[in-house]
Amino acid sequence: MIRIKARAPTHQGHVHRPDRRPLRRALMLPTIWGALAVGYKLTCPLAQQDRLGARIATSAVFFAVGTGLILHVRRTLLRELSQARRVAGAAQSVLLRPPPPRVDGLSVAAAQLSADRGAAIGGDLYEAVATEHGVRVVMGDVRGHGLSAIGTVAALLGSFREAVHDEPALDQVLRRLDRALARHLRERARTEHPSSGLDPDTPVAEEFVTVLLLEITHDGEIHALNCGHPWPYLLSGARIEPLVRADPLPPLGPFPLPSDLPALHCGRLLPSETLVLFTDGAEDARDAGGRFFSLPTVLAEAAGGHCVTPQTILRKVFTALLRHTNGTPTDDVALLVLRNDRPPRPWAAGADADGQATACRGGAGGPAGLLRGS
């Protein structure tokens, strides 16, 4: 006789059943208190009397029970909220992890401010990775903001973190991001199909993402591909100017990428110079009178300080932005600051009397102008 031994269900076929023990424990104490209150009302002789003192005693009992229930529920909700925040913080550290303070000789600092109250992450994305091709940087902005855009952010960041090491050319990195976005939108379209009964926050047909890709080589050469994103600002001493003034490509999503996709040469990032990448939420922020936030003005004030570090620039910009919007920005804002702290090379810098690096800059027609491609 052959016996067939039943096998345990595999992980794929296992039906997860929620653990109801925490719910039972949370309901146990209110049930006991409620039973005691009802028992007091039905069995205690004092509760049956109609005198003023008996009524006061009965009211005090029920008030104490009600207060205890309220405090118990409040404590339970606060505990669950604290747990949810810890989970959200862990998810944020994996999805939009803070960059290391130094990446291949570049000092880096980044931060993001979500427009959704209570949300730590939103529709902005950034990353800086050291590769054999140089430091590759992405800054992006998903249409919409807050929690509804997190899925798109995760798809693009995951693709970028792999592509920067696999692809030798910057245009191939951008094409990988474009394909990752297309796959994500197809999956979302199937999930949000009318047959699923879900009401999408943002229709897939209207989804797009602005993306800026930078590659800073070991000798400071900057190459860029820009799909609808604001160009970063270059801080060189007291001068604040856009890195380039070329028109960007259309955002990813609505239109296919062109077959010919050469990266734009943007000159060199010389020692002690800083790049400030940002999303359009920074320059589109308005105050109560409808005036736009002046990011170049704030950057000029930050660059005029004695100790200009990426962290200092971030702190001053976000402080001024929150003051401008009265603490309530209407769109997600992300900033990524890169400062070249590599040792100066003979062609890039000289040393002053204090031994500090001084960039060899000329006028628009001199060597510096040629390095900028102007």
Image: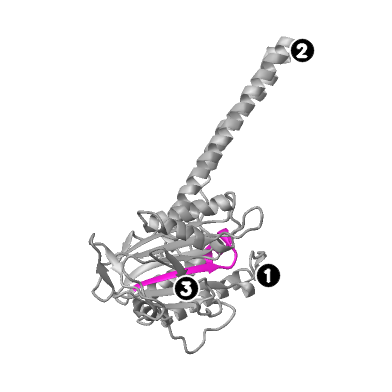
Instruction: Tell me what residue is drawn at x 48 percent, y 52 percent.
Output: 88
Identify the amino acid type marked 1.
Pro
Identify the residue under disc 2.
50
Identify the residue under disc 3.
212
Place residue 45 in its image quadrant: top right
The reply to whether residue 156 is visible in this rendering is: yes
Identify the amino acid type marked 3.
Leu
Could you tell me which secondary element the residue under label 2 belongs to? loop
Which of the two labelled residues, at mark 2 and mark 1, occupies the earlier sequence position?
Answer: 2
Residue 305's spot in the image, x, y percent?
39, 54
The residue mark sitting in front, 2 or 3, is 3
Identify the amino acid type marked 2.
Asp
What quarter of the picture does the C terminus occupy?
bottom left
Q: Relative to residue 37, is residue 241 depicted above or below?
A: below
Which of the two labelled residues, at mark 1 and mark 3, occupies the earlier sequence position?
Answer: 1
Q: Relative to residue 6, is residue 171 depicted above or below?
A: below
What quarter of the picture does the N terminus occupy?
bottom left
Q: Which mark is residue 330?
A: none
Instruction: Tell me what residue is drawn at x 67 percent, y 64 percent.
Output: 199
Which is nearer the eye, 288 or 38?
Answer: 288
Which is nearer the eye, 172 or 31?
Answer: 172
In magenta stretch: residue 142? yes
How packed mark 3 is, by other alpha carbons closer than 10 Å (few <14, some 14-19, many 20 or more), is: many
Which is nearer the eye, 125 or 291?
Answer: 291
Query: Which region of the structure is painted magenta?
Result: 135-152
Residue 349's spot in the image, x, y percent?
27, 71
Which of the two labelled residues, at mark 2 and mark 3, occupies the earlier sequence position?
Answer: 2
Residue that lies at the very extreme toward the bottom in this rendered image: 259
The residue mark sitting in front, 2 or 1, is 1
- In three-dimensional space, the C-alpha distance between marks 1 and 3, rounded to whole angstroms, equals 34 Å
Identify the residue under disc 1.
194
Check if mark 1's residue and mark 3's residue have beta carbons within 8 Å.
Answer: no
